[in-house]
Image (cartoon, rainbow, N blue to C red):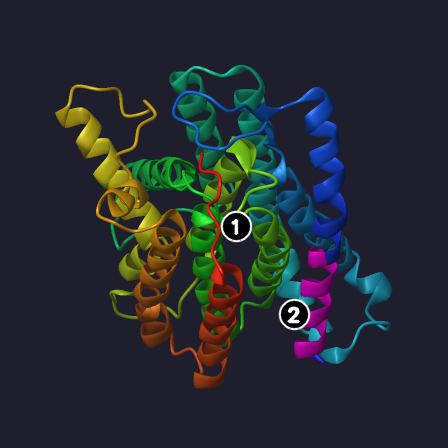
């Protein structure tokens, strides 16, 4: 029953995104926001910046419906299969945290949309991101890392969420790169969620995978739509929040809480560190746009844009292995994750064409 429910969720999110994407594209071409050619941009026509909105809608609709079902579990419990109803109490218990994750992602989407339309101050973006991260802390999500000081936990949590949100935003610099990296990280998290029985977490990640699978063919290798800051900031926040929301069995301190975010977010974190350090060493503001990201460095070393993206996808795929090893992900689940990512890479990278880059 549960595998069928997962497939249904995936198909629903895929369908929602496939319907909403072209609607948002047409609207953006008429009223904005669009990314116009010129300057450091390599695309040759105005391109909508609304892909991320469609992906977030594809995640939010099934998740909100699922939360409503869980909160009304007593009224509809007789209708649902027993395999699902046994998890309703746990979902209800974590409903405030899940709502904080979704509301924070929605706030990031609105913030990014406004930034796409008119440009916002980096300090304003940082302030809103920190406020949303604080909302996660108030809902009970925080990085403890076996540190007893609550103040240190809160500070680390806000720093982690803000850095991850911006790191994912930074890596949205070449067609398909950010969406593919987030998809691969999400698939690894999905394997861990299944292995540890965190099924509502798994449901969110399945919906995210469905939305991204609908978006990627319209963005890679040649872009008809960009995910925009509305999508990159929202997805960065969502992935950071879901990483924080994972729970492990209580016991002696282990390396899992430390390695999980490093593995799932390896490429965005590495890219963010490289870009920020490079800009600080040059005396440039860290939020200044530039061609100093990992993807740009690969292109300068001789890679085509498409092969650079595929190489970073592969790096993220390999970096996620500690999630499987430390989390005890079953072999068949891991094979499904790697198989899905591998097939997607082959299909999307077949007969590569020169694509637009942001």
- As measured in the structure, the alpha-carbon distance from the residue carrying label 1 to the one carrying label 2 is 38 Å
Q: Residue at x 49, y 33 (%)?
A: 43
Return the residue nearer the eye: 134 or 47. Answer: 47
Q: Are marks 1 and 2 in contact (CB under 8 Å)?
A: no
Coordinates of residue 304 in the picture (x, y in percent): 35, 50
Q: Is residue 13 magenta?
A: yes
Q: Secondary structure at mark 2?
A: loop
Coordinates of residue 314 in the picture (x, y in percent): 35, 63
State left or right for residue 144 relative to residue 101: left
Return the mark for residue 186: none
The answer to whether residue 165 is above or below residue 125 is below
Q: Quadrant of the C terminus?
A: top left
Residue position marked by numbered label 1 in the rendering: 220
Residue position marked by numbered label 2 in the rendering: 87
Q: Is residue 253 magenta?
A: no
Q: Secondary structure at mark 1?
A: loop
Coordinates of residue 352 in the picture (x, y in percent): 47, 56
Identify the magenta region: 2-14
Q: Residue at x 21, y 27 (%)?
A: 279
Check disc 2: other Cα within 10 Å, few if <14, some if 14-19, many if 20+: some
């Amino acid at each position: 029953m549960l595998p069928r429910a997962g497939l249904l969720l995936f198909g629903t999110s895929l369908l929602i995104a496939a319907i909403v994407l072209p609607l948002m594209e047409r609207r953006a071409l008429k009223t904005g926001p669009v990314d116009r050619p010129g300057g450091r941009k390599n695309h040759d026509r105005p391109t909508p910046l609304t892909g991320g909105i469609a992906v977030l809608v594809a995640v939010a609709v099934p998740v909100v419906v699922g939360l409503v079902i869980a909160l009304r579990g007593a009224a509809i419990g007789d209708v649902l299969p027993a395999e699902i109803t046994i998890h309703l109490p746990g979902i209800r218990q974590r409903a405030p945290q899940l709502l904080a994750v979704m509301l924070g992602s929605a706030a990031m989407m609105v913030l990014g949309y406004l930034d796409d339309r008119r440009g916002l101050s980096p300090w304003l973006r940082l302030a809103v991101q920190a406020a949303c991260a604080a909302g996660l802390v108030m809902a009970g999500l925080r990085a403890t890392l076996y540190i007893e000081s609550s103040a240190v936990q809160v500070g680390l949590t806000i720093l982690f969420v803000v850095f991850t949100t911006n790191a994912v935003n930074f890596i949205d610099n070449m067609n398909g790169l950010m969406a593919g990296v987030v998809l691969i990280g999400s698939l690894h998290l999905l394997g861990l969620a299944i292995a540890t029985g965190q099924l509502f977490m798994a449901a969110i990640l399945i919906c995210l995978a469905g939305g991204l699978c609908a978006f990627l063919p319209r963005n890679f290798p040649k872009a008809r739509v960009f995910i925009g800051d509305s999508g990159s900031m929202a997805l960065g926040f969502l992935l950071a929040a879901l990483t924080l929301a994972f729970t492990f069995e209580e016991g002696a301190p282990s390396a899992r809480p430390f390695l999980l975010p490093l593995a799932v977010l390896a490429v965005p974190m590495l890219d963010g560190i490289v870009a920020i350090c490079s800009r600080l060493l040059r005396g440039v503001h860290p939020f200044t746009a530039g061609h100093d990201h990992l993807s740009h460095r690969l292109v300068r070393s001789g890679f085509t844009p498409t092969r650079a993206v595929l190489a970073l996808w592969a790096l993220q795929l390999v970096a996620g292995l500690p999630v499987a090893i430390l989390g005890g992900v079953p072999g068949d689940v891991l094979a499904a994750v790697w198989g899905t990512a591998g097939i997607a890479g082959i299909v999307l990278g077949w007969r590569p064409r020169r694509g637009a880059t942001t």
